[in-house]
Amino acid sequence: TTEALLTHVAGAERAAHSRFLANTHELSVLRLHIEARVKEAALLMSEKTTASLLLHTSEDIVSQLRSCLVSQASKWEIERQQFVKDNQNFADENQVNADVALRSIETLREDVRQEQEGMLSAQR
């Protein structure tokens, strides 16, 4: 009976040791799964952070572009107004020159007419 008891205890020890090894293996597998999930979570957090940074960066770029476009549009409007003013001044100057030229032509016509009348009078 002692021998049977020792055999039984030895069998129980072997079974306990087998269960211990199985549990250890199962714990190792679980640890690997947990590590993989932690890495996935870290990657997702990193991707989320990167996406958030990209979003903020793109919003900043859009804001800067909008600001540049508004500034450029303002400059173009000032240039356009100056162009209109310069063209109006040029048109006014051309009108004055045209008026002077017309008066000169009229004066010359009058001079020619008077000269012709003088020549006709001299011929009579």
Image (cartoon, rainbow, N blue to C red):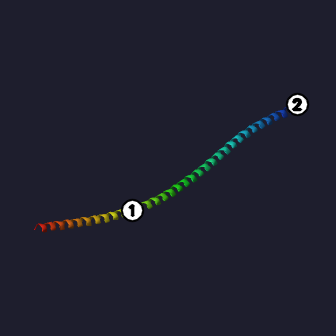
Give the mark nearer the N terminus: 2 vs 1: 2
Residue 62 at x, y percent in the picture:
52, 54
Residue beneath label 2, please?
3
Neighbour tally class for label 1: few under 14, some 14-19, many 20 plus, Cα within 10 Å: few
Q: Nearer the viewer, residue 33 or 66?
A: 66
Judge whether residue 1 can be spotted in this image.
no
Judge whether residue 83 can be spotted in this image.
yes
Horizontally, residue 109 falls left or right of residue 15, namely: left
Single out the residue that lies furthest toward the top.
3
Q: Which residue shows up at 62% across the image and 50% down it?
A: 49
Indicate the quadrant where residue 119 lies: bottom left
Residue beneath label 1, please?
86
Mark 1 belongs to which amino acid?
Asp
Residue 103 at x, y percent in the picture:
26, 67
Single out the residue that lies furthest toward the right.
2
Q: Nearer the viewer, residue 95 or 63?
A: 95
Mark 2 belongs to which amino acid?
Glu
Q: Which residue shows up at 44% across the image and 59% down it?
A: 76
Image: 1 above or below 98: above
Q: Which quadrant does the N terminus fall into?
A: top right
Q: Which residue shows up at 84% across the image and 33% down it?
A: 10
Residue 18 at x, y percent in the picture:
78, 35
Using the numbered discs, state the Cα–Cα distance from disc 2 to disc 1 in whole angstroms. Answer: 122 Å
- Please state the total of marks drawn on the protein image: 2
Horizontally, residue 91 falls left or right of residue 105, namely: right
Q: Which secondary structure lies at badge 1?
A: helix
